[in-house]
Image (spheres, rainbow, N blue to C red):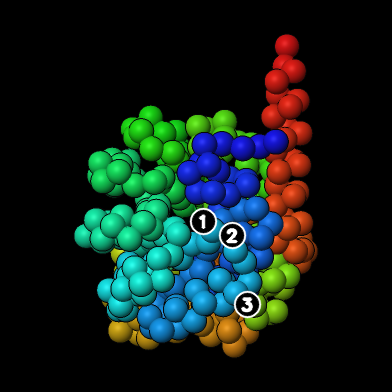
Amino acid sequence: MLKTELCTSLGIEYPILQGGMAWIATGELAAAVSNAGGLGIIGAGNAPAEVVRAEIEKTKELTDQPYGVNVMLLSPHVDQVMEVVYEEKVPVITTGAGNPGKYIEKLKEVGTKVIPVVASVALAKRMARMEVEALIAEGTEAGGHIGELTTMALVPQIVDAVDVPVIAAGGIGDGRGFAAALTLGAQGIQVGTRFVCAEECTVHPNYKQAIIKARDRDAVVTARSTGHPVRNLKNRLTRKLSKLENSQEVDKERLEELCVGSLRKAAREGDVKEGSVMAGQVAGMVEREETAAEIIDSLLAEANEILKEKAKLL
Ligand code: TUI
């Protein structure tokens, strides 16, 4: 079966992490993924610390397997969220949208394994020096806040630059992507978009349907001018944002006004026209709602089959 050293170090069955998506990845989804043998991850996003604590409690009620929390470093509540992580002794955290350096010592002290998401070799090297458990190399195919490089180019460059296990993310939606990631030198994968459409995911049904309906070119990048580019599905909001960004003088205030709260609007209220439907380029590959276990089983079966066939190459 498909196992790597990462499975041993994280105490999981299969090297599959579920992306810790803000407003989407609640305790229900995280627990379902962990119960199916992957690592389920709660998305803290911009949520206040006590909201994150409640999701952690829920996860612990639903699973006795390891789980994680994604800490979004741009959150105004990041320091308080970290306090909750220390108190609850969360087994694993992933971090996004910044450098988690200043929290690492304390996290290690309480026994929380740290897996930063990086989008460049430079940050990967800096993080590897802090002896983190692993790194997630996330390519620009991913949904949400993204870097510049593609997964295909980023993963092998990071694998060559560091001595810690690398997990590939961005653009992985099925077993072919899983096998490709392993071929690039990754020890595991992180999957976001496909898990949004897991039955156990509590996101608004309109959000799941938007992903299921999406085609290959629908996941577009907005907010480049803010320095925090975001990949989300084309809709009324992204068209408004593009128009603003393409105008002679960008109205930063109006741009900010349109972005604030837009993910919540789509994910919780179901407004997939005016809200931000963050999703990766593999949205076009997601065809139906399935259980988390079905997603994991099919990723494993497909990747196994491909790697087995590859071994027979003449
Ligand atoms: O964090 C994510 N994806 C996200 S966060 C998010 S919430 C949000 N909403 C609006 C604007 C900004 C965020 C939605 N999706 N993925 C992990 C990720 N981290 N991708 C890229 C990075 C990254 C980028 C630059 C990590 C570090 C970094 O460098 C910072 C430094 O200090 O060098």
Q: Residue at x 45, y 59 (%)?
A: 91
Tell me residue 235's x, y (percent): 58, 75
Q: Which residue is mark 3?
A: 203
Marks 2/1 in contact by CB < 8 Å: the verdict is no
Cα distance, mark 3 to mark 1?
A: 18 Å
Where, quadrant-wise, is the N terminus in this rendering?
top right
Task: Tell me the CA gap for discs 2 and 3.
Answer: 23 Å
Q: Residue at x 38, y 30 (%)?
A: 160
Ligand 1 within 8 Å of disc 1? The answer is: yes
Q: Is residue 202 above or below residue 116?
A: below
Point out residue 69 in the picture as x, y percentages from the top left corner. 46, 65
Pointer 2 residue: 65
Label 1, residues with CA under 10 Å away: few <14, some 14-19, many ≥20? many
Task: Identify which amino acid the numbered label 3 is placed on.
Answer: Val
Residue 107 on image: x %, y %: 31, 59
Amino acid, disc 2:
Gln
Residue at mark 1: 142
Secondary structure of the residue carrying numbered label 2: loop
- Residue 266 location (% of width, % of height): 57, 81
